[in-house]
Image (spheres, grey):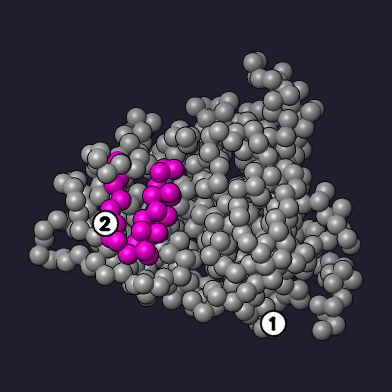
Amino acid sequence: MYDTEENIRTLMSATGLSHEEATKKLAIRVRVTCGNSVPAIKLAEDVQRLLERTIAVAEPNEPCDVELCIQAHPVTNAPMHLSVEVSIDGIVIRNVIPGSESHSYEVDAPTDLHGLFRKAAACYIAGHVIACSVGQQADASSPFAIVPEPFVFNFAALGVTAEDLERPIQLTDTVLVGAGGVANGFLWAADELKLHGEIAIVDPKKVSAGNSNRCLYFDLGDVGRGKAELLAERVNLPGLHITPVQCDLHRHLADRPGKKATRVIVTTDSRRARRSIQGELPAEVLDASTTDISEIVVHSHSLPNEGACLSCIYAHTHDELQQDKHLAEKLGLTIEEIRTPLIDRGIATKLAANFPGVDAESIIGTSLDTFYKKQCGEGALLTKAGKQAAAPFAFISNLAGVFLALELVRFEKNKNQSSRDNYFFASPWQPPHRSLRRRRRRLPTCEFCGDPHTGKALRLLWPERYLA
């Protein structure tokens, strides 16, 4: 149902394990046991949905290596047990020995737990299960170095209250750019919000096998279908009209009134794409991204903007140029062709000539990264240092989507403030802390917000923002 090789490559990249060792690590079986309360049952369902895209989830009558007990007593003799205590304020995860007097299982769960808090908790629980199952690595900087227990996640660290999450949000002239893992997570989380209005999902790409590992609304049977169309078809948010658009943002805006969109929600997977989106000069931007499996970044701003824009957050780096050169050399393309968002007919013909057995027609409209993963070095996309690039595990992409939904709530609540924190980063393997939220200053050399001519263009495009 899911592409296991993608997860194996990710684990190999993060830990230095061999293919055989990583395969064995991810073959562990986890059983999820939960109490009878509605919050515990729903949380267990969310955790299982995330876990099954990375590791095996055991059925009740099957043996398991790890038993995860959510507001419940253990029912197996698994070598490892993890307990999850849920309260209205957050969750606590402990590694426990069944029958140990040092720990008592809490079986009373809150009767009222907001769904967005629950889904954030599910992501952290899934990550902790994977970290504990894989085991602590020799390298202390590894994301799999187990967090000292207990693992305590307080909902207050998310920066919003349950009351904030109940406020209706009206979406108008809004575009969701990207329909991959983070976008899936965003709409999965948005199901817990009171959204109304309309949103367009813009993505020119089709579903690839690797998408099934991260995208909660896709599986291997969807390979080859348009991402935007499929996501719009599978997501059901009462009160929100979703329109799929299978093209890039620039082409989509060319068909919109005024050739602009007031609000852009960004979930694309490249720094270059984000700078291109900023170049369209949207009035409001909300953005979430993942840095392989080590970090999640969330950013938002509106015009006029005292803080950084997308081009400041995702400034061009030397590593990008080196990776472009590496890809160009391995694929037999030019740097300019490597920077093309999707494979066109000319590039497809060239790749088919360079790689015998490749059908040019079948790769038109796919990304070069996807093509390279299939063709080179057991599917390993290498950086200039020879390290495999790691696609995020399911819980990481979806946690980024949850953070993006939370940022939408914060943005709506605080957007009239002249100065606010607009930048957040966190490890997906550790509980979030409020101290990590900060303002991000713009770069003085930024081609968009640092250029007085661009500033003039912004005032012409959005005069109401500057005259208000």
Q: Nearer the viewer, residue 7 or 107?
A: 107
Tell me which corner region of the image, top left, top right, bottom left or bottom right, holds residue 149: bottom left
Residue under label 1, please give it.
416
Q: Nearer the viewer, residue 94 or 217?
A: 217
Residue 244, image x and y in percent?
Answer: 72, 49
Q: Residue at x 30, y 45 (%)?
A: 30
> Is 21 in the magenta?
no
Q: Earlier in the sequence, mark 2 or mark 1?
A: 2
> Is 26 positioned to the left or the right of 391 in the image?
left
Q: Residue at x 55, y 33 (%)?
A: 221
**Label 2 SS:** strand
The CA span between labels 2 and 1 is: 44 Å
Q: Amino acid at mark 1?
A: Asn
Q: Amino acid at mark 2?
A: Cys
- The magenta region covers 29-54
Residue 308, image x and y in percent?
Answer: 67, 69
Q: Nearer the viewer, mark 2 or mark 1?
A: 2
**Label 1 SS:** loop
- Label drawn at residue 65: none
- Label drawn at residue 69: 2
